[in-house]
Amino acid sequence: MAPSRREFLKGCGALIVSFSAASLTQMSASGQGQFETHSSDIDPAKLDSWLAVGADGIITAYTGKCDFGQGIFTAQTQLVAEELCVPITRVKLIECDTSVTPDQGTTSGSQSTPTNFNSENLALAAATAREALLSMAAEKLGESVDDLTLADGVITGKSGRQIKYEDLVGSKRFEIPLSTTAKRRSVGQWTVLGKPVPSLDRVALMTGQFEFLHHVRVPEMLHGRVVRPPEMGATVAHVDEQSVRDISGLTKIVVRKDFVGVVAETQFQAVLAARQLAVRWNPGPELPKQSTFFGYLKGQPSHDALSVDSGDVGSKLATASNVVRATYTYPYQMHGSLGASCAVADVQPDHATVWSSTQSAYPTRSIVAKLLNLPVDSVRVIYVRGSGCYGLNGADAASFDAALLSQAVGRPVRLQFSRQDEMMWENFGSACRIEHRAGMTPDGRIMAWDRENWVASLGSRPGYDQPGNVISGMLIGYPPAPLRPGPAKAPTGRLRNGSNTVPSYFAGCVGETCDGGGTIRSERALTHTVRSPFFTGPLRSPLRIQNTFANECFMDELCAHAKADPVAFRLRHLYDARTIAVLEAAAKASQWKPRPSPISGAVRTGVVTGRGIACVAYEGQNGYAALVAEVTVDLDKGIVHPRRFVLALDCGPISNPDGLRNQIEGGILQGMSRSLVEEVTWSDRRITSIDWTTYRSLYLDYEMPTIESVFVTPPGVRATGAGETTITITPAAIGNAIFDAAGIRLRDLPFTPERVRAAALETINGPQETKI
Amino acid sequence: MQARLPTQITLKVNRSEHTVRVDPATPLLFVLNDELGLRGPRFGCGRAQCGSCTVILRGQVVRSCVMPVSAVGSDEITTLEGLGTPERLHPIQQAFIDEGAAQCGFCLSGVILTAKAVLDVKPEASDQEIRDALGGVLCRCFSHTRMMRAIRRYAEEKKHGSFPS
């Protein structure tokens, strides 16, 4: 039985009585109010940078980690309420506004929880504030801190005398640094954190009152659209301004090198002008063929890096009784945000304001300042939620474009991308090729594993100084960060596995220290980064999903080779206790029956059923998960349909179980869509995935599988991220289930009907073609 | 889509009338967002492929991103905010709140209005029929499971007459 809403309103034992859905609606819908422009040096070492107590008792908290649908707004509100012992209704959270919030870089990489929910930053600020308030109260009441009790924002002394937060500090600054010794309230004490608090945006969302960035309108605002090149590398030859002279309301055609945009009085006029404007483009270079792209990737100059190299892999493989080889490929995929990106910019001669759904408010401020040639302190970026982004979608580019257009016309401009602008020019998730070779002992153990991957990469997040990492910057003349080809150096320091390049079964020894999760000592992981013909950037589980797909499916191949049970075989090669715990928990929860794959008696026609498992230590140590997938495979139609998923997850202490489940479900189902249908396509010259008919996603008519999840939480561990862990293992779990069902090993994503049918034929007739 | 001279057009939206002066070829969505300041319908694709801009007109869901404002006529348009307010929620909104059936929430006009429209016509619709109706609605956060649960909850309550239709 879920606790009632009212229970969440308790703050350290006290109840607040006034509560209505409407109050929360207003709070979330108007959370980003107007503020005076502050100086930009908001010092994260000072408490006042994070927290203020108003004369009305409202706690205002400032965070550099923003919510784009992952629930971090609610969780951070709970965190502040918990540490300050106030009901959540008394906390007002301000997200990512460069005039008032500290610079916490980018909200990405499953880093918001580890960053703000452990013993640093927002969590430390809230704990510091509570201790400071208790000290002030002790002094005022003439009592010892130990004799004070705290409930609902009221401090009570032994004598019974009471004092409220606002009477201690109301509207004044704390003027103290963050304490390095302030103690978080322990998990056992939690009354607000750890509870399934309904997300605070819920009522506003369901009633259409939530303010998305797409709704932001400012006085005197004009509307802009961009006119993008037809293909990568195309440059402007001529812009025919006469071609749009009949469009009323057209304010300006803006051309800056290869950046072309239009500004008009209304959105419709801007759309018409962008569509009608005649621009002659010099063509870009021909593209590598999509059908042979992964072979092309292997032949290109590359920047090489070794994650781990024991130096004996070659000699060990030469002595192995059996060497298993396989090549995996992962396509370019899109963020494909539901709302095409937009932004509003108001650029004046000496200052600028940008309303943006960027994940990187401060970096975006720096780039906008650079593009506009303004001092960085005179630019303010205000985060307003757009549609879910899943990484570097078009939000940054839209923000830069809006700023360029506004500067050109001297009035505020709202820039809205078309669906094609968004899809052709976003920074795709990288295409990857991964090759494995592993040697087996006669008794079915892995004795050596060699792994080499090729990653297509161009641009990425612009950071604070690389505008050319996204299309907008490149069009006005900034190059993307260069790729410097060169051989790999021997790994030094400790194992870095942030991209999950190294499989969980490697010992991960660098020098004398072995930080990997497994037992395989003869190990090598070599990465070749190759220049991509298209922009790439972080997409939910960047490189981790590509690498884990290949690692966990190949592990399954080795397991099949050893005729072992996939769970038992994994356990045989694992050392890390937390990975082992989730693997065992997932097996138990799914009532896994130990046996080798494929299931005996697999047929070559009709509909077959199977189960597969995959696990990961996300980024090496940022969350642990194991996922069991049960699928049906229609061998005649080639259709794979996942029916059930069972997840075991260890992400440390859980801030909000409901929010976590929402992320888990979305992660698995999005991972399923990416496994089954999502792939960016291109022709000789241009991207051909330009809308929802040419880039596929599973719609709401898809019969979704059931999802069950269990949480494993060892005592005393830190909170980790959880937004990307489950998606990381979904493709491999599905791929392994297909193998179990039909004896078909699919090594190329997505698992299309064509590929399933071809693989089914291959198991009957032998290989049909040589893989390139 | 061709530009035409601005015309005075009166729209009936969420039980009130609004007169705007716009190019009659303007997509209804732009009028709802830019002229009337409504937040329910949103620009997703501009190609009627995702459902973010969904409104109800003549009992049917329509994609306001491709419908010229001149085609609306005198019939009433209902947007997501016209269904119910935070103080007086429509039961389907309540069901979505109870199930927590959203992540970013950008898709909700398409999901909620389409589900409501199909159940208004056929209260006993099966899961498959509901899914079929949602065939053109996209949620990229993949809140599908919770959304179907919310729709089913609403359908059950509607069937058992827990609230007036």
Image: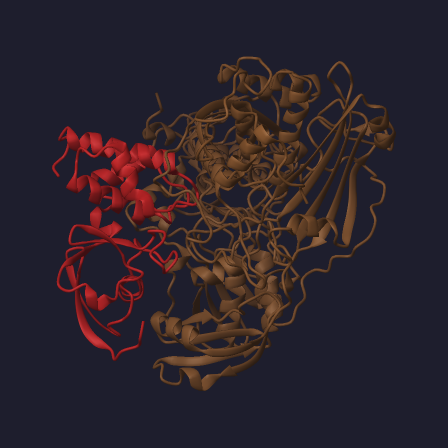
Chain colours: A brown, B red
Q: Is residue A625 left or right of residue A753?
A: right
Q: In terms of image quadrants, where is residue B156?
A: top left
Q: Which quadrant would the N terminus of chain A be assigned to in this image?
A: top left
**Residue A174 versus residue A565 in the image, above or below:** below
Q: Residue at x 25, y 42 (%)?
A: B115
Q: In terms of image quadrants, where is residue B35?
A: bottom left
Count the labels in the image. 0
* Residue A52, x across and y down, in percent: 49, 47
* Residue A605, x across and y down, in percent: 46, 27
Q: In terms of image quadrants, where is residue A339?
A: bottom left
Q: Residue at x 69, y 18 (%)?
A: A562
**Residue A474 versus residue B131 in the image, above or below:** below
Q: Is residue B77 left or right of residue A398?
A: left
Quick check: can you spot residue A454? yes
Q: Which quadrant would the C terminus of chain A be assigned to in this image?
A: top right
* Residue A123, x across and y down, in percent: 56, 37
Quick check: can you spot residue A19? no
* Residue A610, x across and y down, in percent: 50, 22
Q: Nearer the viewer, residue B85 or A224?
A: A224
Q: Nearer the viewer, residue A179 or B21?
A: B21
Q: Nearer the viewer, residue A200 or A149?
A: A200
Most extreme residue toward the front is A765
